[in-house]
Structures are given as C-alpha cells and as structure tokens.
C-alpha cells in the first residue's frame, strides 16, 4: 500500500511557475513508476508527465519544454516543476504510482488545485 500526498498548488499569473510535490509513504517508492495527471472541469483526467522507476520521463505534447518531472528516492518524493504556465493549465493535479509490472496506475493522491490567471 502506498499513500500519496500532493502539495504546492495555488494561484499564479500566466507565465509564472509552480512546483508540485508528491510525498509517498512506504519503503518501496524507488520501485514505482510515478505520474502526474491533471483534470480540468468537465474534462477527463489526462496524464501530463511520467517518470519510470529507472528515471525515464515522458510528457504530453502540450507541456513539453515547460514542465519537468523528477523524483528523489531518498526523500520518497516526486516533483512536477511547471514553468511558463498558461491559463489552459488550470486544473486539479494528481500524482499517481504504479508498480513497474502494471500498465495502470494503482495509487492516487487527493489532488491539488492549480489556477493560472490571464
């Protein structure tokens, strides 16, 4: 069982930056793939960025060059650095974790709101 707690959301002007953190419980964090999802009102939850247990990263096209996902296994924490934020980035952001062997994410945080004003 893994518990995830996000922090770092808030209100920022367009062009600004935020860093989201996802603190995980448990001693097996380093073996999990981690992902950041966002969900805007009336839209489906979408995978924004992912980092494998080995450190390989992937991004949705809309955030490439602006967002960076990283992890610190010693701190059991994953991060999402978000730069050059746009109003369309406004959403609830969730972190999620899955064992390497699974294709779907198994554990979810409670979400943190990110609002970008124009």
Image (cartoon, rainbow, N blue to C red):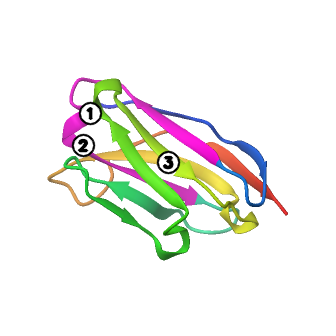
Depth check: give the residue in front, 112 or 60: 60
Q: Secondary structure at mark 1?
A: helix
Q: Secondary structure at mark 3?
A: strand
Look at the image and give the residue range highlighted in magenta: 18-38
What residue lies at 73% left-to-right and 60% top-to-bottom?
15
Q: How many other residues sit within 10 Å of disc 3, few (<14), some (14-19) or many (≥20)?
A: many
Q: Is residue 111 in view? A: no
Q: CA distance from mark 2 to mark 3?
A: 16 Å
Q: Is residue 28 left or right of residue 109?
A: left
What residue lies at 25% left-to-right and 50% top-to-bottom?
55
Q: Name the quadrant containing residue 75.
A: top left
Q: Is residue 43 left or right of residue 75?
A: right
What residue lies at 55% left-to-right and 41% top-to-bottom?
20
Magenta stretch: helix, strand or loop mostly = strand
| Residue 29, numbered label | 1
From the top left corner, tell me how far across and down residue 31 is, in percent. 19, 39
Q: Decide: marks 1, 3 in contact (CB < 8 A)?
A: no
From the top left corner, tell me how far across and down residue 117 is, in percent. 83, 58
From the top left corner, tell me how far across and down residue 11 is, in percent. 78, 46
In the image, is residue 50 above or below residue 42? above
Residue 28 drawn in magenta: yes
Q: Secondary structure at mark 2?
A: strand
| Residue 80, numbered label | 3
Q: Decide: marks 2, 1 in contact (CB < 8 A)?
A: yes
| Residue 32, numbered label | 2
């Amino acid at each position: 069982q893994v518990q995830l707690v996000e922090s770092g959301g808030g209100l920022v002007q367009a062009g600004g930056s935020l860093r989201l953190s996802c603190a995980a419980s448990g001693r097996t964090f380093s073996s999990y793939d981690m992902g950041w999802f966002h969900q805007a009102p009336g839209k489906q939850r979408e995978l924004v960025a992912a980092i494998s247990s080995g450190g390989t990263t992937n991004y949705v096209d809309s955030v490439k060059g602006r967002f960076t996902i990283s992890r610190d296994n010693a701190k059991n924490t994953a991060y999402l650095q978000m730069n050059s934020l746009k109003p369309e980035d406004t959403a609830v952001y969730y972190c999620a974790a899955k064992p390497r062997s699974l294709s779907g994410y198994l554990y979810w945080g409670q979400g943190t709101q990110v609002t970008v004003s124009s």
